[in-house]
Amino acid sequence: MTDNKYCVIMAGGIGSRFWPKSRQSRPKQFLDILGTGKSFIRHTYERFAKIVPTENFLVVTNRKYRDLVLEHLPELTPEQVLCEPVGRNTAPCIAYAAYTLQKRNPDAEMIVTPADHLILNEEDFRAIIRECLEFAAAHDALMTVGIKPTRPDTGYGYIQVSAAQPISKVKCFTEKPDLELAQTFLQCGEFVWNSGIFVWKVKSIIEAFAKYLPEHHLLFSGVQRALGTDAEQNIVELAFAECRAISIDYGIMEKADNVYVRCGEFGWSDVGTWGSVYEHTAKDEHGNAIPEKNCYLYDTRLSIVSLPKDKIAVISGLKEYIVVDTDDVLLICPRADEQNIKKFIDDVKYNNGEKHI
C-alpha cells in the first residue's frame, strides 16, 4: 500500500546572517553550528524520518548544493533532489515540489519544512505534525504550525488565532512587528509565532496556487508536464526565470480562507542569527558561549566565540560580543550589531570580490 505522507525540505538559502561561517559554497543548513555533531539538514531529515518513509522525501535546493544534499542525506536518490536554477523565495520552491508530487502521487499529503530549524522536544513535535496530517487529510485545509511566544520577538512573523484550542482557523498574519506591537501581541494572548512549517494535501495547495498565484500555476503546470522528458531542464529554467519571487505567506496563506494553525510548544527556534545560537548554546560561568577547548577568556562576559578546529584564541576585555574566526575571515562585532552583518558582507564583496562570501 502506498504511503501518501511526503516531506519537502526547503534547503536553498545561503544563511548570510551566519557569515563568515556560512558561505555561498557551504551555507548554514550544511553546517553543525550548534556543535551537535550533525548538520541542520541532517537533523531535519532524521526528525521527519520517523513519520515519512525515506523514498517520500524531496529536497528543494539551489542546483549548486545538489551534491551537498546527497552528501548529508545519502539515503536519498538524485531524483529526490529538486534543483532550483535561482532562488525565488518560498512560493516557487513549494510550487516546484507540489507539482512534482502531484504527478508522482495525486493523493500526496505534504509536510513542508525549512532545513535549518532547532526543535528540542521532537516527540511532542512529531505528535503535532501527525495531528496536522490527520486534519489536512480530512479537510480542504492549508495548515501551518504556530509556536506559543515566550517573548516579544521582532524577528518572527505572527499569526492571530480565532479560538483557544489546539487547531483553529487563522484570523490574520503579521510580518515581523516592531517591539511595541510585539509586546501587544504577547499580552493579547491571541497571537503565535509563525514557524514556517506547513501541512496540506497536494490537491489543496495546487488549487490555492491556481486561485491566488495563477501565473505560478501556469508556469509550474508546464514544469509538471515536462517532468521526465528531455525538455524538463529547459522548462524548469524558464519557470524560475519568469516567475515572481514571493513567499508562500504573502502569495497564498494571507489570502486563502481555509488556513488553519496548530499551536504547540516543543522547544522551537529558527536559529536565524548568531544571537539565537548564543541563546541555545551552553555557557561558562560568565555567560560566554565558547568552544570546549583552545579559547582563553579574560574579563570577557556574555559573548559568543566560534573558532576553526585546533585554533587557539586569547580574548580579553569584551562584553556581549560575537567573535567568529575562519581560515580567511575574522568577524568581531557587538551582539547588538548583528543586524549589520549583511552590510559587512556587502562591503567585503564590493572591495574584495566573492571569494570571502
Image (cartoon, grey):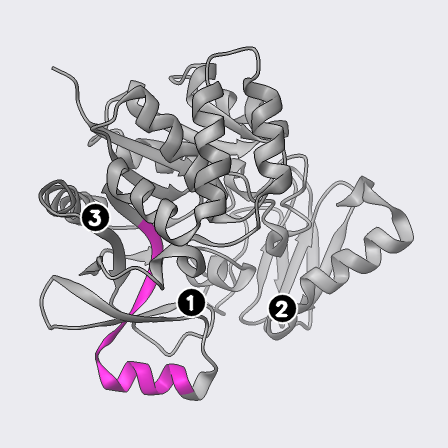
In this rendering, the answer to whether 353 lies above or below 48 is below
Which numbered disc, 2 or 3, marks the residue that appears first in the sequence? 3
Residue kind at label 1, given as amino acid type: Tyr
Instruction: Specify the segment rendered in magenta.
Output: 181-197
In front of the other: 3 or 148? 3
Which numbered disc, 1 or 3, marks the residue that appears first in the sequence? 3
Q: CA distance from mark 2 to mark 3?
A: 30 Å
Quadrant occupied by the N terminus = top left
Q: Is residue 184 left or right of residue 297?
A: left
In front of the other: 103 or 268? 103
Q: Which residue is mark 2?
A: 339
* Quarter occupied by residue 304: bottom right
The disc label shown at residue 125, or none: 3
Mark closer to the observer (1, 2): 1
Identify which residue is drawn at 54% across, 28% down.
Answer: 83
In this rendering, does residue 96 appear at all? Answer: yes
Identify which residue is drawn at 36% across, 34% down.
Answer: 98
Q: Is residue 15 left or right of residue 52?
A: right
Q: Which residue is mark 1?
A: 156
Mark closer to the observer (1, 3): 1
In front of the other: 22 or 315? 22
Q: CA distance from mark 1 to mark 2?
A: 14 Å
Identify which residue is drawn at 49% across, 45% down.
Answer: 215
Give how far across and how far down residue 227 sits, in percent. 46, 18
Crowding at mark 2 (Cα within 10 Å: few <14, some 14-19, many 20+): few
Element at label 1: loop
Identify which residue is drawn at 58% across, 49% down.
Answer: 15
Give how far across and how far down residue 187 sits, in percent. 26, 86
Q: CA distance from mark 1 to mark 3?
A: 19 Å
